[in-house]
Image: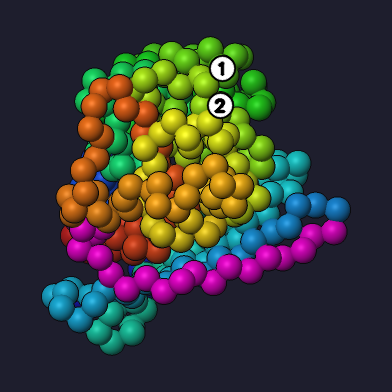
């Protein structure tokens, strides 16, 4: 980190330097190693006539024992009302600093960092929780994050077919067509229940506030991946899905921020003790993961600044090597 030139890395460059196979490996090491992650700043912004917006500030830094130390912060705005405007609802910027001196090193595209580390972390969790022979993936949602899920999962499992369901069938077909153009088997499905009953992995990346996934649809051995909901009001799976599943989370913040956990815990459907492990515990192998081919597993993520820092560091170091 002797080069003090500030690098500005746009979305295309940031994405090119975060291939999923390498990113999953980087995140595995980062979660096992750990870093300092203060509680994120979470602010609600009222919007008259629209859903409330959210401002997130997510800092993280490496501890002193690490030979190469970085410090980073992600600034995120989430405006759900942007959907009707035809523009992205989430915008973010990532700033990376030298962890020893505080000198700014890079300004990165935070949207790309967020999207790619999010699905890579879910793929990492699935590497512990999904059946080894999982081949049929159902993606719920067709936005920016959802569009990356198939490639991320192909880095850890032999995905042969992707079904896509979205509240907007045109968006689902558009994503399916894009995957087919890349030589993948993909289908936009009109019947969410039928697709869920056939899936080996169900991955949801939506801003839903009412459950989309019903527990009664899940066949034995299914892995459920809940990416989208990040506030107590958001929900992607119903109570029965939680009851039937072995539950895992990315960080303990999920117990307080994710409606998929907050609501059933508040209602007494499950307790916080029902959560078997966090992702860092899985990566350190402190706890067992899937125990049988019939077990239903469920992973709920709200995101962590640890993953942002790991991804940003990976981009920056790759950019140095590439010149």
Residue 31 covered by magenta stretch: yes
Which residue lies most toward the front here?
268
Q: Which mark is residue 289?
A: none
Image point (25%, 84%), residue name: 100
First along the sequence among labels 1 and 2? 1
Q: How is the image coloured?
A: rainbow
Which quarter of the figure has residue 179?
Answer: top left
Q: Position of residue 135 (x, y in %)?
A: 31, 19
Name the residue tied to disc 2. Answer: 214
Residue 282, relative to residue 293: is it above or below?
below
Residue 42 covered by magenta stretch: yes
Residue 259: tell me if it is visible.
Answer: no
Please name whichever residue, 309 or 238, is drawn nearer the observer in this view of the structure.
238
Name the residue tied to disc 1. Answer: 193
Which quarter of the figure has residue 186?
Answer: top left
* Cα distance between the residues tagged 1 and 2: 8 Å
Q: Nearer the viewer, mark 1 or mark 2?
A: 2
Residue 259, relative to residue 33: is it above or below?
above
Circle 1 SS class:
helix
């Amino acid at each position: 980190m002797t080069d003090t030139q500030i690098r500005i890395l746009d979305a295309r460059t940031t994405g090119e330097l975060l291939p999923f196979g390498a990113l999953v490996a980087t995140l595995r090491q980062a979660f096992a190693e750990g870093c300092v992650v203060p509680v994120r700043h979470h602010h609600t912004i009222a919007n008259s006539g629209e859903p409330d917006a959210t401002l997130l500030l997510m800092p993280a830094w490496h501890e002193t024992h690490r030979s190469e130390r970085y410090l980073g912060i992600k600034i995120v705005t989430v405006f759900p009302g942007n959907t009707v405007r035809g523009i992205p609802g989430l915008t973010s910027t990532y700033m990376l600093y030298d962890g020893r001196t505080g000198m700014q090193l890079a300004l990165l595209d935070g949207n790309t960092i967020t999207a790619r580390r999010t699905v890579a972390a879910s793929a990492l969790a699935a590497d512990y929780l999904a059946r080894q022979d999982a081949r049929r993936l159902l993606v719920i949602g067709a936005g920016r994050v959802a569009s990356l899920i198939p490639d991320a999962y192909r880095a850890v499992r032999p995905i042969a077919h992707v079904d896509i369901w979205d509240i907007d069938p045109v968006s689902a077909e558009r994503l399916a067509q894009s995957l087919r153009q890349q030589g993948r088997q993909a289908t936009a499905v009109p019947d969410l229940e039928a697709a869920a009953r056939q899936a080996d992995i169900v991955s949801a990346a939506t801003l839903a506030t009412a459950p989309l996934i019903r527990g009664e649809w899940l066949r034995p051995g299914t892995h459920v991946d809940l990416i989208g909901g990040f506030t107590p009001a958001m929900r992607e799976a119903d109570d029965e899905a939680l009851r039937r599943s072995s539950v895992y989370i990315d960080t303990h913040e999920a117990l307080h921020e994710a409606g998929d956990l907050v609501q059933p815990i508040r209602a007494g459907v499950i307790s916080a003790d029902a959560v078997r492990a966090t992702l860092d515990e899985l990566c350190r192998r402190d706890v067992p993961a899937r125990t049988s081919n019939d077990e239903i597993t469920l992973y709920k993520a709200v995101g962590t600044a640890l993953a942002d820092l790991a991804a940003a560091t990976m981009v920056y170091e790759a950019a140095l090597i590439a010149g």
